[in-house]
Image (tube, grey):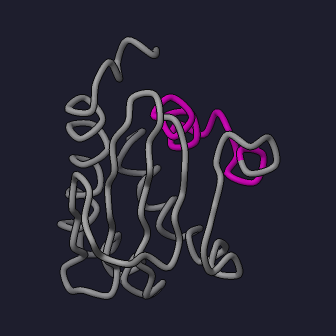
Amino acid sequence: MAEQFKDDQAVYATFGGLFQSLASDDEASRLARESKLIVRFRFKSPEAEILLNCRKDPVDVRCGKTQTSADLDLTVTAEALDRILLGKLAMAAALTKGELKARGALLKVKSLGPIFDAAQKLYGG
């Protein structure tokens, strides 16, 4: 499975494409905007960054490093996010095991639930 994410361009194609689909989907975008979060995914192995600005309508998705401040910085491997979105790894378990690390307004982590739920439907379905 790690072969699927051999470089940053593969991460951007997979997850950037997913989040662009989320931004284009009326219901998923509405759920993401309700969180009012700016979330940065910092991928390791391979290194990449994706920023979701859920304060904008439509949700703004940026692939690559940006200067925008985020409410939450999530550090994760592409493989771990893949397993989370496929329902093979629960977000809470990923946080507990250290496969997903969150920095920032940690009380807002539970606001990620609807974003991840919407992303899971688009990713696995």
Percent position of residue 37, x then y: 45, 81
Asked if residue 49 lies left or right of residue 70, the reply is: left
The residue lying toward the viewer, choosing from 83 and 71, is: 71
Asked if residue 123 lies left or right of residue 95, the reply is: left
- Considering the image in quadrants, where does the C terminus appear? top left
Q: Residue at x 30, y 76 (%)?
A: 68
Asked if residue 4 lies left or right of residue 76, the reply is: left
Q: Residue at x 67, y 38 (%)?
A: 89
The residue lying toward the viewer, choosing from 45 and 93, is: 45
Give the extent of the magenta segment: 78-94
Q: Residue at x 46, y 28 (%)?
A: 45
The residue lying toward the viewer, choosing from 62 and 67, is: 67
Percent position of residue 35, x then y: 48, 84
Count the marks: how many? 0
View extreme (front): residue: 67
Q: Quadrant of residue 19?
A: bottom left
Asked if residue 6 lies left or right of residue 61, the reply is: right
Secondary structure of the magenta portion, mostly?
helix
Percent position of residue 34, x then y: 44, 87
Percent position of residue 98, x then y: 74, 43
Task: Say whether residue 83 is magenta.
Answer: yes
Q: Residue at x 47, y 36 (%)?
A: 44
Q: Can you say whether 77 is above or below 108 in the image?
A: above
Q: Can you say whether 52 is above or below 76 in the image?
A: below
Q: Quadrant of residue 28?
A: bottom left
Task: Say whether residue 89 is magenta.
Answer: yes
Q: Quadrant of residue 124?
A: top left
